[in-house]
Image (spheres, helix red, strand yellow):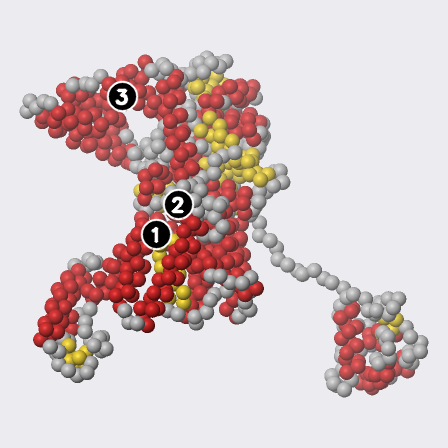
């Protein structure tokens, strides 16, 4: 930039010697005016020094030479050319200006992913131990009955978290899950099922069955009296009433001396109603006689298979590794032995217990990390030990009431495996520790489970694992999903208050269930109710309509260059909103994977797009397809991340035919488009030639025929008909609702007003609102008047029915 030219160098000493700055600037401008037009002119170092003496650019517009070069020097130096030592700005060999200095933008601090960690009870920044690799262990189900919505709460929620970590934040997630197939509940249920089926096969006579049920009710009634838990007590009372109600008809039939099929039918009803009562009674008498280990493995094998089917139906990703307790017994035995070798376990009467006192008093260890306030809760500890393991004899084997079983000596009627302490079976808590420790080592990134597992199960897992590895960091982040309630009531399999996943899927699709979960925080209680599901259905409809509208827009033939239309203010604003909402979604997902807020931001984006499309339609202009396609692809991507859309779908919710691989939309839409265009042509001709019958037929095709096939046509004045593929049941529901709405609107009209709006037909009306003259002023004939009177009377009845409904608080 700066150089020297002796030929044109001014006498700066004379200029700088001028004391008055205004005069000095004028002199400098005169010199520059003669030099600025010299070919190849560049500022010299003397020029720069002269500018350092100026306090600012001249205010006089006549002195534009000084003003121009002052700004130039200020830009080069990164500020006004204040006084100071020479900057050493040099010209290149050819006298070219040097490239100005560049400063990077300040930018903004990227948000960090934070997860609610039960170990700290706060949202902690998520930092995996090994780069982008995340090791994750999730507690799986205890398989002794059908999977229910409580299971869905945990496994759909963890599936969402796993997908977000993997597909959005791009972590390399290694996900392990277990199947508990050895447990007190499984043993007891398998034994009871076996004994009940054996009893059923004996085909007891009606009198014998009644006698057995009455005998079984005696210990059952005693258990009911001892039950303090109000929910469990209520469940037992319901069961007792059901058995009594089933027994009463059988007792009456026996007293009356009835026989044959009627008596047999009543006996079968009682047998089914009293199954649980009889099973408990049979188990108390004959449970110890069940010694075949296969009886205890068949039940969990069956229910595990059903569980996997349910997870597949819910679109829950399978784990990378699945572990079964029955396959890890040798590893569990070794794990228990190591804990004993480290001084934290002790054998007692063939069982092995964890020494909680010794562990808690050891340096570097702490018992009850998750729920320290629950330590000593004997009710919770007994539930953790299992129904078959809390006898007075078993409890007396412990050094401390807080100690828990690592290995249980098997009693008659229980499965067993050989070990150094005698035949026995694993305790519940040790199973996860041994399996997770074998696969993931001394420390994992994430451990997950339902919030009801925090104490004692997960606290005991932590204690025994850290006793094995002699560390205090077996789990870095503990994630617990919230409870699930059924219409506000506690859900519990043991209380027989639950809805199976299969039953839930009969009412709603897997996507709808997932959307309901996405609309709630994964760590909070979720109420599975009609209101919850209606919100999910509305959300699905909103998104689906948007996708269908965009698909219709994209089907319109257009040359490649023509789709890139000039953006007006509307497109600029929509695009700004698009990026604002994307940033908000990202912020929400960084905040403990807050899918609820993320979905609300996505809803707002769809709402903004709908307003844009409506404004375009009102102006009879096509919306900007490239921008809307970008937004639709983004929303599709996010729904894929959440597991609400299959990977195969390119845009929106996919529609499949009878074959799993058949894409219904791409197969039938070309034919539907041809049909729609043909119908539009027919309607145009019918309007031109005034053929109302043809218009009625085209309306019937739209309103009655095509919805039965899952097709919706939307007619818009001045615009092409929109063709949409949708769920048949949804369309039929919409048609029914539309019909009800039309009927309600008609019912609301008083008969005195029903003809007043038909000014194109009638010109005069009587005091009741009945037409008397046509538009030409001619009096209506008696036949016409009679016909209108009948319509009037029919409307009177309809309107009266409406008024009665309103008065009674009903709805049509």
Q: Which residue is mark 2?
A: 657
Q: CA distance from mark 2 to mark 1?
A: 11 Å
Give the residue drawn at x 39%, y 36%: 310
Give the residue drawn at x 57%, y 52%: 111
Q: Quick check: 259 left or right of 36?
A: left
* Most foreground residue, 641 or 452: 641
Q: Callout 2 environment at 10 Å: few (<14), some (14 to 19), or many (20+)?
A: few
* Most foreground residue, 496 or 217: 496
Q: Which residue is mark 1?
A: 710
Residue 219, position as x, y percentages in the image? 23, 23
Q: Which residue is mark 3?
A: 196
Most extreme residue toward the right, as rendered?
Answer: 6
Q: Is residue 55 visible?
A: no
Residue 500, position as x, y percentages in the image? 34, 37
Give the residue drawn at x 45%, y 39%: 316
Residue 152, position as x, y percentages in the image? 40, 39
Q: Which mark is nearer the camera, 1 or 3?
A: 1
């Amino acid at each position: 930039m700066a150089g020297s030219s002796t030929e044109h160098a001014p006498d700066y000493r004379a200029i700088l010697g001028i004391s008055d700055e205004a005069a000095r600037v004028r002199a400098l401008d005169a010199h520059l005016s003669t030099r600025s037009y010299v070919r190849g002119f560049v500022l010299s170092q003397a020029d720069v020094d002269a500018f350092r003496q100026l306090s600012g650019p001249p205010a006089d517009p006549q002195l534009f030479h000084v003003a121009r070069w002052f700004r130039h020097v200020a830009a080069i130096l990164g500020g006004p050319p204040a006084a100071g030592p020479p900057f050493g700005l040099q010209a290149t060999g050819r006298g070219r200006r040097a490239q100005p200095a560049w400063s990077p933008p300040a930018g903004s601090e990227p948000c960090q992913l934070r997860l609610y960690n039960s170990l700290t009870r706060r949202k902690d920044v998520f930092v995996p131990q090994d780069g982008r690799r995340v090791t994750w262990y999730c507690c799986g189900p205890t398989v002794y009955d059908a999977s229910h919505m409580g299971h869905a709460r945990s496994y759909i929620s963890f599936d969402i978290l796993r997908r977000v970590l993997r597909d959005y934040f791009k972590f390399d997630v290694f996900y392990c899950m277990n199947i508990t197939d050895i447990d007190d509940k499984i043993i007891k249920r398998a034994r009871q099922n076996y004994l009940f089926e054996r009893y059923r096969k004996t085909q007891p006579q009606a009198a014998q069955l009644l006698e057995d049920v009455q005998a079984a009710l005696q210990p059952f009634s005693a258990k009911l009296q001892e039950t303090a838990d109000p929910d469990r007590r209520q469940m037992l009372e319901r069961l007792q009433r059901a058995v009594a109600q089933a027994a009463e008809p059988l007792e009456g039939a026996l007293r009356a001396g009835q026989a044959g099929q009627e008596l047999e039918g009543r006996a079968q009803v009682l047998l089914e109603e009293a199954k649980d009562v009889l099973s408990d009674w049979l188990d108390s008498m004959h449970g110890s006689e069940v010694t075949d280990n296969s009886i205890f493995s068949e039940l969990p094998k069956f229910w595990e298979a059903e569980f996997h089917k349910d997870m597949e139906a819910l679109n829950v990703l399978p784990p990378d590794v699945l572990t079964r307790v029955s396959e890890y017994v040798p590893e569990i035995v070794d794990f228990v032995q190591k804990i004993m070798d480290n001084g934290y376990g002790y054998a007692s009467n063939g069982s092995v217990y964890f020494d909680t006192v010794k562990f808690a008093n050891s340096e570097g260890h702490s018992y009850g990390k998750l729920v320290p306030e629950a330590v000593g809760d004997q009710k919770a500890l007994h539930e953790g030990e299992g129904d078959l393991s809390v006898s007075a004899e078993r409890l007396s084997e412990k050094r401390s009431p807080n100690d828990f079983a690592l290995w249980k000596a098997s009693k008659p009627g229980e499965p067993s495996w050989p070990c150094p302490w005698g035949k026995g079976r694993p305790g519940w808590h040790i199973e996860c520790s041994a399996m997770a420790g074998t696969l993931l080592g001394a420390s994992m990134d994430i451990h997950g489970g339902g919030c009801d597992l925090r104490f004692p199960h997960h606290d005991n897992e932590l204690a025994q694992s850290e006793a094995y590895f002699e560390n205090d960091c077996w789990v870095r982040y503990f994630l617990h999903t919230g409870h699930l309630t059924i219409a506000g009531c506690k859900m519990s399999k043991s209380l027989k208050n639950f809805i199976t996943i299969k039953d839930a899927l009969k009412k709603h699709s897997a996507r709808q269930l997932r959307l309901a979960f996405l609309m709630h925080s994964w760590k909070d209680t979720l109420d599975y109710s009609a209101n919850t599901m209606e919100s999910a259905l509305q959300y699905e409809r909103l998104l689906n309509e948007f996708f269908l509208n965009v698909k219709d827009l994209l089907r319109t033939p257009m040359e490649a260059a023509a789709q890139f239309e000039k953006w007006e203010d509307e497109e600029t604003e929509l695009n700004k909103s698009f990026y604002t909402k994307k940033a908000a979604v990202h912020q929400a997902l960084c905040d403990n994977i807050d899918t609820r807020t993320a979905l609300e931001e996505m809803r707002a984006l769809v709402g903004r797009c709908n307003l844009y499309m409506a404004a375009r339609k009102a102006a009879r202009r096509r919306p900007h397809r490239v921008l809307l396609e970008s937004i639709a692809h983004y929303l599709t991507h996010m729904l894929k991340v959440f597991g609400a859309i299959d990977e195969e779908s390119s845009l929106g919710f996919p529609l499949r035919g009878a074959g799993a691989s058949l894409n219904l939309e791409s197969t039938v839409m070309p034919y539907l488009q041809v049909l729609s265009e043909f119908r539009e042509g027919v309607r145009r001709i019918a309007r031109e030639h005034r053929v109302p019958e043809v218009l009625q037929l085209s309306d019937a095709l739209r309103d009655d025929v095509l919805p039965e096939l899952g097709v919706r046509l939307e007619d818009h004045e001045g615009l092409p008909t929109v063709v949409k593929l949708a769920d048949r049941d949804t369309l039929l529901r919409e048609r029914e609702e539309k019909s009800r709405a039309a009927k309600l609107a008609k019912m609301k009209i008083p008969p005195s007003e029903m003809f007043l709006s038909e000014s194109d037909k009638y010109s005069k009306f009587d005091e009741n609102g009945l037409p008397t003259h046509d538009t030409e002023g001619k009096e209506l004939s008696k036949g016409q008047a009679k016909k209108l009177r009948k319509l009037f009377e029919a409307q009177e009845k309809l309107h009266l029915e409406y008024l009665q409904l309103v008065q009674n608080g009903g709805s049509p």
